Amino acid sequence: MSQRYIFRFWLPLAIMWLMMAIEQPILAALIARLDEPKLNLAAFGITFSLALLIESPIIMLLVAGTALAKGRQSYGQLIRFTTLLSMALTALHLLIVITPLFGLFVGKVIAAPPALVEPARRAFFWMLPWTAAIAYRRLWQGVMIRYGKTDQVSITTVVRLIFTVGVAGVGLIWRGLPGASLAAAALSVGVIAGAVSARIYVAPILSDQLALAEAEMDRIGMRSLLVFYAPLAMTNIINFISRPLLTLGLSRGLAPLESLALWPVLMSLAFLFRSIGFAYQEVVVALFKDKQSMAALRRFAISAGLALSALLILLAVTPLNHFWYARISGLTPDLVDLARAPTLIIGLAPAAAFITAWLRGALVTWRRTPPITAAVIVNVMVLTVVMWAGIQWLAIPGVNIAALAFALAVMAETIFLGFQVRSRQDMLMKPGGTSPSL
């Protein structure tokens, strides 16, 4: 398996993730150009973190669609599972936004400044369609990946971005909504458009390959689907818990309002660099067949990850830092000055994202998903300890402590997964071992 072949397969998926990553800097720049930018940037950071936490169980539907959609029966189970999960999570979202639960969580648990609670609640209401739209889109995108339609996957994300930016642009001219609410509304319209386009592109596959009966061994019951999917869902639930934990640390460290305002902009930059590494997991699931392909996929992950980390570090230590945060993101001078150190601290995060995607893909291919959950638990444990210790003993802005906790946590997760894959590789690839196939 050549590096060129891997690159061609991965590139459309990388574009998909890159388009999603571009959303956040665009929306942060939009909020920064409207009234009360610090207040609305901080409110949107809280809103987006909570929305990601609620949607976290559906993220791995992309992997499930890629790995399991092999015929009429298996796809039927997947679409039923997606519908039930979407309904439950949307009901939870609505319950939180219309009851005192939102104020309790944001005001008491996160301990955000009181002025942020209502702006964040209004923005959170605008994101009500978010989870269901993403759930269906990711399932259908996974089906497209399985049947080699990676180019169409990237097109659906371009559609999403066009609608998100379009709504944001209209709102910037109209100025009828606060920045946080406008960004949330733009995201909701974008994900709905992305889901509709994904359904259009997946239709030929549904009427052709997935209209046929699969082999008996490829059929899945709801119980076996839950056994496969639950560890993957828990991975994202635990992982997204770290976002409110980081927000808690930001609000209790030095310069809380500045840290809360800068953090979503910093994380959008980190996501921009890490996102194309996330796309690599589905590449590994689709292409991992034997020991030779495993080595080729590992080599690509290491090379691409180190190249991206080098670019992020370059941005942190050169005038590009000022260009990004001041000119592109539209931050005030005090926030621009504050951004250099945390950007440098997270410099190795893109490399960790690529290598983690390769390691997770190998475990999914072997259907050994529980270690993925364990690795994320390690991530959150390291993040919590570093955040707590930093707040107690380091007299530095909260955003620097959060960046340090984030960087050490993703590196710990990568190292843990490395040991897990190494031990299973030795077991599964020796003579008489289980073949690492789907």
Image (tube, helix red, strand yellow):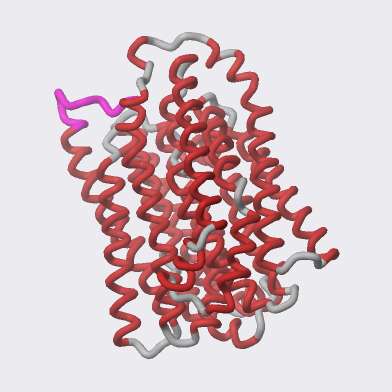
Q: Is residue 429 magenta?
A: yes
Residue 403 appears at what percent x and percent y?
42, 73
Q: Is residue 311 visible to the viewer in this orientation of the structure?
A: no
Q: Residue 233 in the image: x percent, y percent?
A: 38, 43
Q: Is residue 416 left or right of residue 403?
A: left
Residue 223 position by quadrant = top left
User: Which residue occupies 41% across, 48% down?
Assistant: 301
Where is 334 relative to 132, above or below?
below
Q: Position of residue 231 (x, y in %)?
A: 31, 41
* Residue 204 is at least partly visible in this image: yes
- Indicate whether residue 138 is drawn in magenta: no
Asked if 131 appears above or below 22 in the picture, the reply is above
Query: In terms of depth relative to the viewer, which is nearer, 146 or 370?
Result: 370
Identity of the residue drawn at 69% across and 74% down: 32
Q: Nearer the viewer, residue 147 or 297?
A: 147
Predominant secondary structure, magenta span: loop
The percent coordinates of residue 12 (x first, y second) are: 59, 40
- Please state the extent of the stretch shown in magenta in the rendering: 428-438
Left or right relative to 73: residue 221: left
- The residue lying furthest to the bottom in this view is 395
The residue at the point 37 percent across, 17 percent down is 218
Residue placed farthest to the front in the image? 99
Q: How many marks?
A: 0
- Taking 261 as reference, is 237 left or right? left
Q: Residue at x 36, y 42 (%)?
A: 232
Up-down relation of residue 111 to residue 338 (above or below): above
Q: Which quarter of the rendered picture does the N terminus lie within?
A: top left
Q: Is residue 332 above or below residue 88?
A: below
Figure quadrant of the C terminus: top left
